[in-house]
Image (cartoon, grey):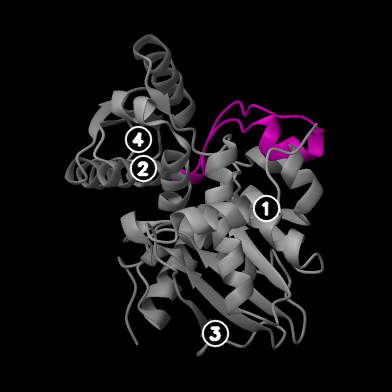
Amino acid sequence: MTLAIGLGDVQAAHARIRDAVRCTPCVPASFLREAPLADATLSLKLECLQVSGSFKARGACHKVATLSPEALARGLVTASGGNHGLGVAYAGWRAGVPVRVYLPRSTPAAKERQLLRWGARVVRHGEVWDEANDAATRAAQAEDLAYVHPFADAAVMAGQGTVGLEILAQASDLDTVLVAIGGGGLISGIATAVKGLRPAVRVIGVEPVGAPTLRASVDAGRVVTLARISTAAGTLAPRTSHAYNLAIIEQHVDDIVLVSDEQMRDAARWLWSEMGIAAELSAAAALAALRTGRYPARAGEHVCVLVCGAGTDGIQGAERC
């Protein structure tokens, strides 16, 4: 299968959206009160500081930049567990066009309130993202709206890949980058950028034990639809991905490891107590893989962990040092 994007697409996206999104910091970190993991060097790429609260603004703004004025005028529609919807709402707000976001009923009310503040219209539908997405695609077809897919879209993937370009520029001696996986759009873009510029850098995906969508698909050699989802990390919980994403992941991602909800929660608490970083459950997944040894860092290895979204999952029950 022909890959949907290449390095040149990500570089072009970077040029198109540089004035619409933030170049977020990549900060050095250590495990402080805890024993270092094999004396590895740790950096945190803080996309939780991105406009709208996550990396999703990148892909959404790039998608909007590729649409015709006529398509934009009719409006945007998408389905989201929360963060992608916020990115699309932000992109629509910048373009001055209407945005409708379909959310599963499990999406936290706080995400809906944020969407409304960006001027989006919110529609609740279904229990999981896949059901909300069915409703969004039907609305797009019936009303001739521009549908913005959260992961199976070349423009969106290229926009998300700009995170990878920034990481390489900010961490010159990088060995490995750890990236949380939902539908696969973020890691598809990052892996395309990283392997295109520095093929020796390892790209490791991290999924919840309760939503191993891409791990199951890679193991099966085809796109798998999970029978059920059992994770509280709603932004990492589609029941299925897409052949575009699977093809890129199979070629460019070195491994996918799984972490539990409690391991993600513990990592989110660490981010708050040690670094003062307020991250949602899914944003702590990559760090959880490192802290638990699901990804065993080697001595001297420089690992960059992507903290991909802001939230309060780490604040309750945690203490600041």
Query: Whole-Å distance between the Cαs marked 3 and 2?
Result: 30 Å
Which residue bears the numbered disc 1? 8
Q: Amino acid at mark 2?
A: Gly
Q: Amino acid at mark 1?
A: Gly
* Marking on residue 115: none
Query: Whole-Å distance between the Cαs marked 2 and 4?
Result: 10 Å
- Where is residue 315, by image quadrant? bottom left
Up-down relation of residue 35 to residue 272 (above or below): below
* Marking on residue 82: 2
Residue contact between numbered discs 2 and 4, judged by CB atoms under 8 Å: no
Q: Locate the C terminus and report the quarter of the image it occupies.
A: bottom left
Q: Position of residue 116 (x, y in %)?
A: 19, 40
**Residue located 81% across and 47% down the image:** 251
Which residue bears the numbered disc 4? 106
> Which comes sooner in the sequence, label 3 or label 2?
3
Q: Locate the N terminus and report the quarter of the image it occupies.
A: top right
Q: Amino acid at mark 4?
A: Ser
